[in-house]
């Protein structure tokens, strides 16, 4: 397994098919197209403070983690926007390895906090708990359709 920083739009492009496969499958059953994913990931890539990694097994991308460093009065934090691992590679350490690489890189940048949003009822929540994340009880995710 090889982990590389996402430092070009070509690497973003290599993540698109995997993202579609992962999030259109259970448990999400989303309806992503290659074009909507491409736009989403390029938007992340073009965000100030972008940090991302993809994982390869041979020549195949099997995982990715993307987000950006944001300023806060307590110091910078990393907002983890997306993490995805090939369905056939889940529960084999790919996600743990990606998070460790991300954590090491962020510590080198003097970033010591990561935040993310995930569904409490789905397996990624348990994955993040196992990797040291905690729920912030006094925070609420809010939404409005306009």
Image: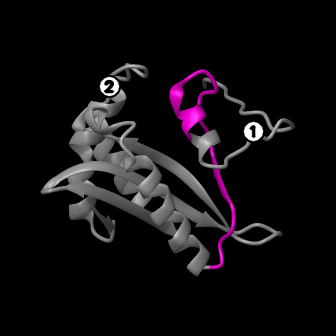
Q: Residue at x 42, y 56 (%)?
A: 97
Q: Which residue is mark 1?
A: 135
Which residues are drawn in magenta? Answer: 110-127
Looking at the rendered image, the disc whose residue lies closer to the viewer, 2 or 1, is 1
* Badge 2 or badge 1: first in the primary sequence: 2
Q: Position of residue 61 (x, y in %)?
A: 22, 51
Mark 1 secondary-structure assignment? loop
Magenta segment includes 116: yes
Q: Position of residue 63 (x, y in %)?
A: 32, 49
Name above or below for residue 84 compared with residue 144. below
Visible residue check, residue 46: no
The one of 41 and 24 positioned closer to us in this rendering: 24
Q: Which residue is mark 2?
A: 24
Q: Residue at x 82, y 69 (%)?
A: 74
Q: Residue at x 55, y 65 (%)?
A: 103
Q: Position of residue 120 (x, y in %)?
A: 64, 26
Name above or below for residue 25 compared with residue 45. above
Q: Position of residue 30 (x, y in %)?
A: 38, 23
């Amino acid at each position: 397994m090889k982990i590389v920083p996402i430092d070009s739009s070509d690497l973003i492009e290599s993540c698109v098919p995997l993202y579609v496969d992962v999030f259109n499958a259970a448990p999400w059953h989303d309806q992503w197209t290659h074009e909507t994913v491409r736009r989403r990931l390029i938007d992340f890539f073009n965000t100030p403070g972008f940090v991302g990694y993809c994982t390869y097994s041979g020549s195949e991308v099997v995982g990715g983690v993307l987000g950006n460093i944001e300023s806060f009065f307590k110091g910078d934090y990393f907002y983890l926007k997306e993490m995805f691992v090939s369905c056939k590679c889940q529960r084999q350490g790919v996600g743990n390895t990606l998070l460790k690489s991300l954590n090491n890189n962020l510590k080198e940048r003097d970033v010591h906090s990561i935040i993310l949003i995930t569904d409490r009822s789905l397996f990624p929540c348990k994955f993040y708990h196992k990797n040291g994340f905690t729920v912030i009880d006094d925070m609420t995710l809010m939404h409005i359709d306009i």
